[in-house]
Image (spheres, grey):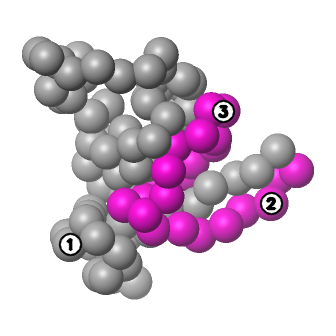
Amino acid sequence: MSARIVNNVTRPAPVTIHVNDTEILAYEGESLATALFANGWLIMSRDASGRARSPYCNMGVCFDCMVDVVDAAGSCSRVRACMTVVRPGVRIKVAAQ
């Protein structure tokens, strides 16, 4: 079940993204953090001690929402989920829940 607000909201058609090889629906233009939260992914990464990290500031200052985005060639980039926009087919790797 989606945690998104649905009443009186107009969105484009959903697109599929992949999180740890699981398909989820998201909307172009929303942040990866929003898409992850709305689909129940609360932990983005873990610190050196193994503690769970999630978005704290949600504006790109704290770096607690770091995720790995894998491109079509298999190259991986570490990005802030709160500052990265959903694109169709994007593949994301997040820490184990």
60 is higher (above) or lower (below) than 89: below
Question: Could you give the CA–CA distance between mark 3 and mark 2, rounded to whole angstroms?
Answer: 15 Å
14 is higher (above) or lower (below) than 94: above
Q: Amino acid at mark 3?
A: Gly
Q: Which residue is mark 2?
A: 75
**Which of the 4 quarters of the picture holds residue 43?**
bottom left
Mark linked to residue 8: none
Q: Is residue 57 left or right of residue 28?
A: left
Q: Amino acid at mark 1?
A: Cys
Q: Residue at x 40, y 83 (%)?
A: 48
Residue 21 in view of the camera = no
Q: Is residue 37 left or right of residue 75?
A: left
Looking at the image, which is closer to me, 82 or 10? 10
Question: Where residue 90 appears, x then y in whole percent?
Answer: 63, 41
Question: Could you give the CA–CA distance between mark 1 and mark 2, rounded to whole angstroms?
Answer: 28 Å
Q: Amino acid at mark 2?
A: Ser
Image: magenta residue range: 73-97
Secondary structure category for the residue under label 2: loop
Mark linked to residue 89: 3
Circle 1 packing at 10 Å, graded few (<14), some (14-19), many (20+), is few
Residue 40 in view of the camera = yes
Q: Which residue is mark 1?
A: 57
Secondary structure category for the residue under label 1: loop
62 is higher (above) or lower (below) than 9: below
